[in-house]
Amino acid sequence: MSPISRVIFASRWLQLPLYLGLIVAQAVYAYHFWIELSHLVSGIVHSGEGSHPVMTETAIMLIVLGLIDVVMISNLLIMVIVGGYETFVSRLGLDGHPDQPEWLSHVNASVLKVKLATAIIGISSIHLLKTFINASQYDEKTLVAQTVIHIAFLFSALAIAACDWLMAKSIQAAAKAH
């Protein structure tokens, strides 16, 4: 390898601090999850006491949706950290490990893009559901904007999946031609 090639190839390690930063963000989300869960539990416990207002089903649902949102974002972080590191930096050496994620064995940039797009749609769905449960708190412009953004995410994911499908078909066709 030429010196330039070695430098270019070694530059992938510049992503390591970024992945470590995402691990710190993951810890922040875990902390946030436990704070929100404690609010839910304390709200339910205190709702039986006369001094605190009763927690409504809607309030409980919104907190639970918030918890689901945190988990989905956390899952997205794991996909980016583990999949991105494995794809773009270095192998993790997890072959045969009992806890190796199923999807990691066949991850590549295309698979990662589709998985990320799907996760973003899930997160967007949770946000949209939370907004519509609390629709009276939002103006019509906000409701329409969030719906349009969600639809844009859906179309983007479909476009990514279609491009990946077309690329796979062209690779298969090229392989058959040889």
Image (cartoon, grey):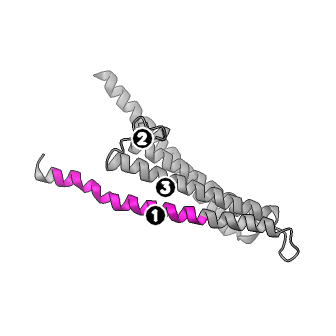
Residue 129 lies left or right of residue 153; in this view the side is: right
Any magenta on residue 12? yes
Question: Would you say residue 134 is visible in this rendering?
Answer: no
Q: Residues within 10 Å of mark 2 (few under 14, many from 20)?
A: some
Q: Nearer the viewer, residue 24 or 83?
A: 24
| Pointer 1 with pointer 3, Cβ within 8 A | no
Is residue 62 among what the camera can see? yes
Closer to the chain start, of discs 1 and 3, is 1
Query: Any mark on residue 77, and which?
Result: 3
Task: Label 3: state its secondary structure.
Answer: helix
Q: In the image, which is nearer the foreground, mark 1 or mark 3?
A: 1
Q: State whether residue 4 is above or below residue 141.
A: above
Give the distance between the C-alpha atoms of the residues marked 1 and 2, in whole angstroms. 23 Å
**Quarter occupied by residue 149:** bottom right
Measured as percent of width and height from the top left, residue 90 is found at 31, 47
**Dots 1, 2 in contact, CB < 8 A:** no
Question: Is the C terminus in the top left, top right, bottom left or bottom right quadrant?
Answer: top left
Mark 1: give few (<14), some (14-19) or many (20+) Cα within 10 Å: few
Q: Which residues are magenta?
A: 6-32
Q: Amino acid under label 3?
A: Leu
Q: Residue at x 40, y 33 (%)?
A: 168
Name the residue tied to disc 2. Answer: 107
Tag 2: amino acid: Val
Residue receiving disc 1 = 24
Nearer to me, 154 or 68: 68
Q: Which residue extends farthest bottom? A: 51
Residue under the image location 37 percent in, 61 percent down:
18
Q: Position of residue 30 (x, y in %)?
A: 56, 61
3 with respect to 104 (left or right): left
Residue 95 shown left or right of residue 36 in the figure: left
Could you tell me which secondary element the residue under label 1 belongs to? helix
Earlier along the polypeptide chain: callout 1 or callout 2? 1
